[in-house]
């Protein structure tokens, strides 16, 4: 017997899947015509907080961050819609930094814990995925270093890129705090 699904059934499925995947869409760099990185996600470098709130209605102020005591502090904003994916990696938090009322950097963080049966944590596995993604997209990093405590235990891995006045920094910190490690991705002007 051949059964047919009514058209409204397909529409409901499409609407439902849109609701389920809201906020899990990938946030990627905005690449301009000349190959320059123009911004991140829906935000271009230098955009005001007011315009950013129009692009991301769920954007809200979180904290101030002092980078230099002689300058005004950086305003850090977060979004309610998460988890956010960058390069296929789901990050725990993504911070949007505004300096002098203009968007200038994004920082994503992922923390995981070592456990009794953990060989590779989520942060360390994500390091490999992000490093490969960034190499494919931006080429070989300008700087790359890895520090070890022992032959098998990594403490810090870092990669840096600079392209068209934009910096990209990928950092893995192993065994930070109580059996925790952390992956940090930063991009900015």
Image (cartoon, helix red, strand yellow):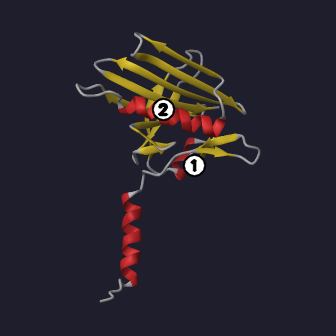
Label of residue 128 in the image: 2
In this figure, what is the number of numbered marks?
Answer: 2
Mark 2 residue element: helix
Residue closer to the observer: 60 or 181: 181
Q: Quadrant of residue 101?
A: top right
Q: Which residue of the protein is positioned furthest toward the top in this rendering?
A: 149
Image x and y of residue 89, in percent: 45, 41
Image x and y of residue 147, in percent: 48, 13
Image x and y of residue 77, in percent: 47, 37
Question: Which is more N-terminal, label 1 or label 2?
Answer: 1
Q: Is residue 145 above or below residue 75?
A: above
Report whether residue 46 is seen: no
Q: At 38% from the left edge and 37% from the top edge, which residue is drawn?
A: 92
Check the picture and name the quadrant holding the C terminus.
top right
Label of residue 87 in the image: none
Report whether residue 92 is seen: yes
Is residue 113 toward the left or the right of residue 166 in the image?
left
Q: At 58% from the left edge and 33% from the top edge, which residue is drawn?
A: 187
Residue closer to the observer: 96 or 141: 141
Return the residue at label 1: 42
Q: At 71% from the left edge and 46% from the top edge, which residue is drawn?
A: 32
Is residue 111 toward the left or the right of residue 184 in the image?
left
Mark 1 residue element: loop
Q: Is residue 18 above or below residue 46?
A: below
Q: Quadrant of residue 115?
A: top left
Q: Residues within 10 Å of mark 1 (few under 14, many from 20)?
A: few
Image x and y of residue 94, in percent: 45, 37
């Amino acid at each position: 017997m051949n059964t047919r699904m009514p058209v409204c059934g397909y529409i409901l499925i499409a609407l439902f899947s849109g609701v389920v995947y809201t906020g899990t869409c990938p946030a990627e760099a905005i690449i301009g015509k000349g190959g320059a990185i123009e911004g991140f996600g829906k935000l271009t470098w230098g955009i005001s907080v007011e315009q950013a709130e129009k692009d991301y209605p769920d954007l809200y102020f979180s904290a101030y961050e002092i980078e230099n005591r002689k300058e005004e502090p950086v305003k850090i904003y977060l979004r309610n819609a998460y988890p956010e994916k960058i390069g296929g990696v789901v990050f725990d938090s993504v911070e949007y930094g505004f300096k002098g009322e203009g968007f200038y950097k994004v920082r994503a963080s992922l923390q995981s814990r070592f456990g009794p049966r953990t060989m590779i944590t989520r942060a360390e596995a994500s390091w490999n995925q992000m490093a490969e993604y960034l190499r494919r997209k931006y080429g070989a990093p300008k700087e790359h270093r890895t520090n070890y405590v022992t032959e098998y235990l990594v403490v810090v891995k870092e990669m840096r890129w600079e392209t068209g006045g934009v910096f990209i920094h990928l950092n893995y910190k192993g065994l930070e705090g109580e059996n925790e490690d952390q992956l940090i991705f930063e991009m900015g002007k």
